[in-house]
């Protein structure tokens, strides 16, 4: 579970080839004021064909699709 400070810290999102989270050839980086905003964007916008959203948090954590779905679900509440 992420802390409020982690969710409120800056983050950036990019799209990478499916299955290469953190290792592929990324698209342009999109900066967000908070991890919360980056996750919202990733879950509500269609990725380019053959690509998936990957977010790099201020802590250095690389969050791929599985993590993003878990974070999104936790932000939606019970």
Image (spheres, grey):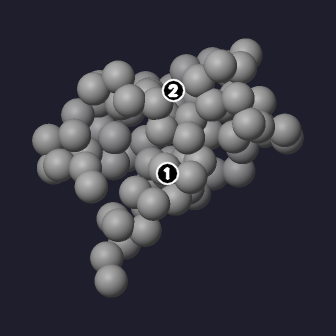
Residue 9, percent from left and from top: 23, 34
Tell me where residue 48 sits by quadrant. Answer: top right
Mark closer to the observer (2, 1): 1
Q: Indicate left or right for 66 with 20 as reference.
A: left
Q: What label does residue 51 carry, if any? A: none
Q: Is residue 24 above or below residue 19?
A: above
Considering depth in this image, is 36 or 61 the residue closer to the camera?
A: 61
- At horizontal 59% and vertical 24% (from top left) the residue drawn is 22
Q: Are marks 2 and 1 in contact (CB under 8 Å)?
A: no
List the single residue furthest toward the right.
49
Residue marked by disc 2: 30
What is the spatial separation of the Cα atoms under label 2 and label 1, in whole angstroms?
A: 16 Å
- At horizontal 48% and vertical 50% (from top left) the residue drawn is 67
- At horizontal 84% and vertical 38% (from top left) the residue drawn is 50
Could you tell me which secondary element the residue under label 2 belongs to? Answer: strand
Could you tell me which secondary element the residue under label 1 belongs to? Answer: helix
The disc, 2 or 1, on the residue closer to the chain's N-terminal end is 2
Considering depth in this image, is 17 or 9 the residue closer to the camera?
A: 17
Residue marked by disc 1: 68
Q: Indicate left or right for 27 with 7 as reference.
A: right
Q: Indicate left or right for 4 with 30 as reference.
A: left
Binning the other alpha carbons within 10 Å of mark 2 as few (below 14), some (14 to 19) or many (20 upward) gives few
């Amino acid at each position: 579970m992420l802390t409020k400070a982690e969710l409120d810290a800056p983050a950036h999102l990019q799209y990478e080839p499916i299955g290469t989270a953190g290792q592929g050839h990324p698209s342009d980086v999109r900066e967000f004021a908070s991890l919360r905003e980056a996750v919202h964007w990733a879950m509500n916008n269609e990725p380019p064909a053959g690509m998936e959203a990957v977010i790099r948090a201020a802590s250095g954590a690389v969050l791929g699709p599985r993590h993003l779905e878990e974070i999104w679900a936790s932000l939606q509440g019970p």
